[in-house]
Amino acid sequence: MIPALFLVSYPEIARLVDAKPVILPMHIFENFLFDVKLLESELSEKSKLLILCSPSNPIGSVYARKLLEEIAQIVERHPGF
């Protein structure tokens, strides 16, 4: 799973290991941070990796501690992730 906007190499890195990149859309009105509800809705038994850069590269958005904790709680509920 790759939050958009992202470096062009991220999806290609996933493809190199035969993974299907799933892009999580982000919007300027959310400071280019993704919605945790969207993350949870996109997770499946096939989900294995979330690329999360903070500060975000190339945008520069910074994930607040509270948002990172929410992401961690979601990931903990999905043992294969």
Image: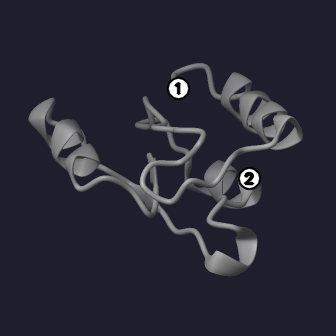
Q: List x then y, in percent, for residue 12.
A: 16, 46
Q: Label 1's element?
A: loop
Q: In the image, what residue type sits under mark 2?
A: Val
Q: Residue furthest bottom?
A: 29
As drawn, the residue found furthest toward the right would be: 66
Number of labelled discs?
2
User: Upstream in the sequence, badge 2 or badge 1?
Assistant: 2
Farthest residue, direction left: 16
Residue 76 visible to the viewer:
yes
Residue 20 visible to the viewer: no
What amino acid type should be assigned to the residue bearing mark 1? Answer: Phe
The residue sitting at 49% across, 36% down in the picture is 50
- Secondary structure category for the residue under label 2: helix
Q: Which residue matches tag 2?
A: 36
**Residue to which mark 1 is pinned:** 81
Q: List x then y, in percent, for residue 19.
A: 23, 38
Q: Residues within 10 Å of mark 2 (few under 14, many from 20)?
A: some
Q: Position of residue 5 (x, y in %)?
A: 44, 63
In the image, 59: left or right of 14? right
